Amino acid sequence: MCRLVESIKVEGGQLIHIEWHNLRFNEARSEAFGVEQAVNLQDLIVIPSDLSSGVYKCRVLYKEQIEAIEFQPYTPRKVETLRLVDGGAIDYHLKLENRKALNELLLQKGEADDILIVKDGCITDTSYANTAFFDGTQWFTPDMYLLNGTQRRRLLAEGILTEARITPADLFKYTAAKPINAMLDFEKTHCVTIHNYEFIFCRVDGI
């Protein structure tokens, strides 16, 4: 098993939604490496004093134990178009440091900014985020996903998102979409308008 990674948003010198990262980190260590003793990442991560302002990504690389902790400046990527790709038998239910399988799918994006992966006939994730779709009234997230992201889990628990089975043929039901991951503030993340059946999305500033 290669190393796993936990990506945590650091903003204003604080670890954001650390309780959800603790949950996934400890679940993953148990499944992948048989480690049953839970730990609190907040006790193990020391945020450098010069990161007291701005937004950074904290990457915790680990197997049975934490092997490295990295901090990187973070700027949201600009994604205005997505290309639908078949994910085949891809399995990314653990957040692996080795993203070879995702990167190979990403080679199919052509002129699009990113991909939207379909598995077993269902919409799942982009190459870097879970997804949410708006029907004019409420937000839904696919019940089929590659990685059960921490932000996805939190938004479901808080009732902001509802799970739904979403296939390519269902896209006409939705007017807009958003990416979801731990680095993005769901309320502030830009929406994209679904304007045709081929999963080409045009950016708009909000709904």
Image: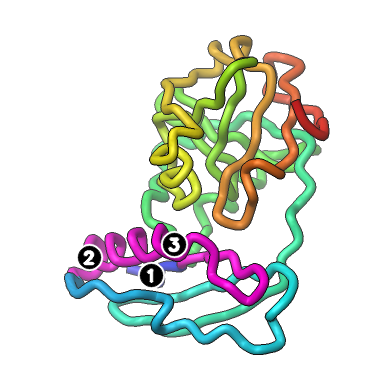
Query: How would you rate the neighbour count of disc 1 (Cα within 10 Å): few for under 14, some for 14-19, many for 20 or more?
Result: few
- Tell me the residue at 46%/68% (across/down): 5
Name the amino acid type tagged 3.
Answer: Leu
| Residue that badge 2 annotates | 30
First of labels 1, 3 by sequence position: 1
Q: Earlier in the sequence, mark 1 or mark 2?
A: 1
Q: Considering the numbered disc 3 on the image, is that residue within a helix, a strand or a loop?
A: loop
Question: Where's residue 35, x and y in %?
Answer: 20, 72
Q: Is residue 120 left or right of residue 112?
A: left
Secondary structure of residue under mark 1: loop
Q: Position of residue 187 (x, y in %)?
A: 65, 41
In space, the residues marked 1 and 3 are separated at their CA atoms by 7 Å
Q: Which portion, as a residue range, is magenta? A: 6-34
Residue type indicated by callout 1? Cys
Residue identifier under label 1:
2
Q: Residue at (44%, 33%) from the top-left corner? A: 159
The three-letter code of the residue at mark 2 reads Ser
Query: Is the C-beta separation of discs 1 and 3 under 8 Å?
Result: yes
Q: Residues within 10 Å of mark 2 (few under 14, many from 20)?
A: some
Q: Is residue 203 magenta?
A: no
| Horizontal relation, residue 62 to residue 105: left or right | left
The correct choice, above or below, for 70 with respect to 176 in the image is: below
| Residue 2 occupies quadrant | bottom left
Quadrant that contains the N terminus: bottom left
Mark 2: which secondary structure?
A: helix
In this figure, which residue is indicated by the disc labeled 3? Answer: 96
What is the quadrant of the C terminus in the image?
Answer: top right
Q: From the viewer's perspective, is residue 180 above or below residue 50?
A: above
